Image: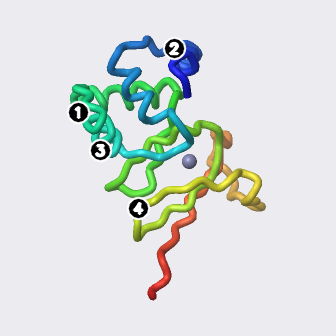
Amino acid sequence: MSRAEILAKFEDHGVLPTQQRLEVADVLLVKPQHLSADQIIEKLRKENSTVSKATVYNTLNLFEKNGLVKECLVDPERRFYDSTTQPHHHFYNADTGELSDIPMSDIEVSRLPELPAGTQLEGAELVVRIRNLAE
Ligand SMILES: [Zn+2]
């Protein structure tokens, strides 16, 4: 994603562009991917960025709150930020910690329980947990 596209995205989501936010966006929004805060920090360090850990966390929270990225809670130990914000499902490989996308159309949810009173359905995105076969 080009700088101009990122700036347009920021504007769409009401995020004010700062140098640090742009650096985090450059790493995360460049392609459809799932990265943890630590992975983002690691990539920033490789590019000699001086953005602090706290700023990365705050920036990711802000992006999430404004719908610029989506948070994937697949594992209490691993919180991923997803650059794809449209609804979709995931494979989660518990052996490798890798998260990969499954298009919405590949899974059909044929029956859902009755929703609790006073609620409406917001989404039903699945995490399909997998493991590597033993060799
Ligand atoms: Zn995803």
Q: Residue furthest front?
A: 47
Kindly identify which residue carries mark 3: 38
Kindly identify which residue carries mark 4: 97
Q: Does dot 3 land on a helix, a strand or a loop? A: helix
Residue at the (41%, 21%) spot, across then down:
22
Q: Residues within 10 Å of mark 1 (few under 14, many from 20)?
A: some
Kindly identify which residue carries mark 2: 14
Q: Earlier in the sequence, mark 4 or mark 2?
A: 2
Q: At which x and y percent is residue 25?
A: 44, 28
Q: Amino acid at mark 4?
A: Gly
Depth order, front residue of 104/49? 49
Q: Does dot 1 land on a helix, a strand or a loop? A: helix
Q: At which x and y percent is residue 90?
A: 57, 56
Q: Does dot 2 land on a helix, a strand or a loop? A: loop
Q: Residues within 10 Å of mark 2 (few under 14, many from 20)?
A: few
Q: Amino acid at mark 1?
A: Lys
Q: Specify the quadrant of the image occupied by residue 74.
A: bottom left
Q: Are marks 2 and 3 in contact (CB under 8 Å)?
A: no
Kindly identify which residue carries mark 1: 53
Q: Which mark is residue 36?
A: none
